[in-house]
Amino acid sequence: MGEAKGIVYDKEDFEGIFSGYDQDEGPNISNNAMHQFTCDDSAGLKGFHTIFQPLVYSVVLLLGVTGNSLMMTVLLRSRGHLRITEIYLLHLALADLLLLATFPFALVQVFMRVVFGDVLCKLLGMLNRLNFLSSSLLLACISFDRYLAIVHAVPSLQSRRPRNVHLTCLTLWLLCLALSIPNMVFLSVGKNQTDPSQTLCSFYSHGIHANNWRLTDRVMTHVLCFFLPLGVMTYCYTAVGLSLYRSPARQRSQEKKGAIRLAFLVTAVFCLCWLPYNITVLMKTMIDLRLVHGLDCQALTRMKISLVVAESLGYSHCCLNPLLYAFAGQRFRQDLLRLLVRWGCGRVCGRVVIQTSSSRASASFSEGLPTATTNIL
């Protein structure tokens, strides 16, 4: 084994692997001269990248594709009779699957350090941003729909028609596409500034305009992908919880408690998955803008590792969405079991379907309140 070589760092140059397609070592958003220094040992960091990243992304890819594919299959089988929330869930599963479709390319990048050329660089960067944005905003739409259905049941009937929901989703996709096009314009394949032997997909073209977009993209990520969805979810599910808490006594207390717990869980999971990433990226932006000074090699190495860990935690939300929004629903579970029986699950699934059917309470939103715990979603 040869001696580990030092790794050259640019103080302003730390980016997560999925922030463009792979902008690990791309140009910084500051227009000042670069300040580089060499760390004595890069073996630990390289080992972390080649073991942790592929392992986590592979698990997220496997679980996410399985869960979201099952969710889409079940929903598409009933596409003529989808409820309002299920329309949003269908679009959410599509967004998550398209986002997960970029993972294999990133895994190849980590394992083989291969970049696939300008076309895929631009396409994957745009797809990643498009589906990241749409997934986050669809979560906000789902919580707002539950708010309308439960807190304002009668006044919201007109706005919650399937046609209006489809138009809302179409508008959302077009908005996210428009916000993703700059990634396709500015991303390109180029030489790593700190290691010319390495080729990366990053913001190498268009000079100051690419740097300005990179900073804008970070602000947009904070606002549209975290603070806005979190704010909407917190307000809507708090209002839903209060509405359920104040509901008439004929509503069983256990059901109300379960619905409130589920609303809290959905919001808490979103916050726990994405809060570390947003904090870490905010810290990196402050470093890039030279609002934070005096960081040594060890601190910047920790920052780079923190970005990878936080980003991995955030993208794990892709495989949690089906569990939180679909598999938790009684109707969806029963439809899934029927599908598994048809696919050859056999007697075990058949018995579960029968038991579920016999114990299933009729669910109705006629009064704006769920009669089953999971109908909040």
Image: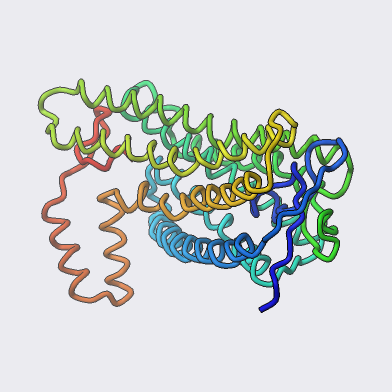
| Residue 102 relative to residue 148: left or right | right
Q: Where is residue 264 in the image (x, y as percent from the top left)?
A: 32, 35
Picture residue at 70% right of the left edge, 39% below the top? 179
Q: In which quarter of the image is residue 263?
A: top left
Residue 109 vertical position relative to residue 213 in the rendered view, above or below: below
| Residue 265 relative to residue 220: left or right | left
| Residue 372 relative to residue 183: left or right | left
Residue 189 vertical position relative to residue 349 in the rendered view, above or below: above
Picture residue at 49% right of the left edge, 38% below the top? 275
Picture residue at 75% right of the left edge, 39% below the top? 214
Q: Which quarter of the rendering shows the N terminus?
A: bottom right
| Residue 123 relative to residue 263: left or right | right
Q: Where is residue 34 in the image (x, y as percent from the top left)?
A: 84, 43
Q: Which quarter of the rendering shows the C terminus?
A: top left
Q: Position of residue 45 (x, y in %)?
A: 62, 60
Closer to the camera in the image, 289 or 327: 289
- How many marks overall? 0
Picture residue at 37% right of the left edge, 49% below the top? 81
Closer to the camera in the image, 172 or 15: 15
Q: Report the colour scheme.
A: rainbow
Closer to the camera in the image, 113 or 260: 113
Q: In which quarter of the image is residue 153?
A: top left
Q: Where is residue 186 in the image (x, y as percent from the top left)?
A: 81, 46
